[in-house]
Amino acid sequence: MLIRLDPASEMPIADQIVTQIRRGIADGDIEVGERLPSARDLAAALAINMHTVLRAYDSLRTAGLIELRRGRGAVVIAGANAPTTALYAAAAALVRDAARLGIAPADLATIIRGMT
């Protein structure tokens, strides 16, 4: 599993991890039953604090995407392929399309808010 962090981003590191794991699940790159790296291993690979990874994993657990198992670590669960994952995939595609058109994320958010 490849996670790339953008230290210049305004998005907190834990949120960047959550976003990339969600995208991996939505795209099918991370499958149900797949074990994520241990918090310690991922933190070492990314050169960040282990508690940042634990915060990201806790957010994913709260969202119903992973289960934290003692001795087994973080495992993607069946509910991860729920309709919200499909919605996330569609939203991620929208963000990518907007970026290709030169629309900044903040501007895209303004456009979306104007639709509701």
Image (cartoon, helix red, strand yellow):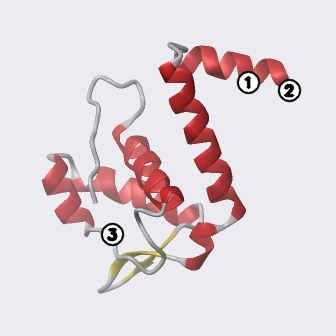
Give coordinates of residue 114: x percent, y percent: 80, 17
Q: Give residue 64's quadrant in the image.
A: bottom right
Identify the residue under disc 1.
112
Rendering coords of residue 104 (x, y %): 52, 15
Local crowd at mark 3 within 10 Å, few (<14), some, or many (≥20)?
some
Quadrant in the picture for the N terminus: bottom left
Is residue 41 placed above or below 106 in the rendered structure? below
Q: From the image, tell me which residue sits under label 2.
A: 116
Q: Amino acid at mark 2?
A: Thr
- The residue closer to the viewer here, 4 or 7, is 4
Amino acid type at circle 3 is Leu
Could you tell me how far apart the alpha carbons at marks 1 and 3 are, in whole angstroms? 33 Å
Image quadrant assignment for residue 5 = top left
The Cα–Cα distance between marks 2 and 3, rounded to whole angstroms, is 36 Å
Residue at 39% of width from left, 41% of height from top? Answer: 16
Q: Is residue 7 left or right of residue 83?
A: left
Look at the numbered discs 1 and 2 and tell me whether their residues touch, using CB distance below 8 Å. yes
Q: Is residue 29 above or below residue 8?
A: below
Which residue is tagged 3?
36
Q: Residues within 10 Å of mark 1 (few under 14, many from 20)?
A: few
Asked which secondary structure carries label 1, the reply is helix
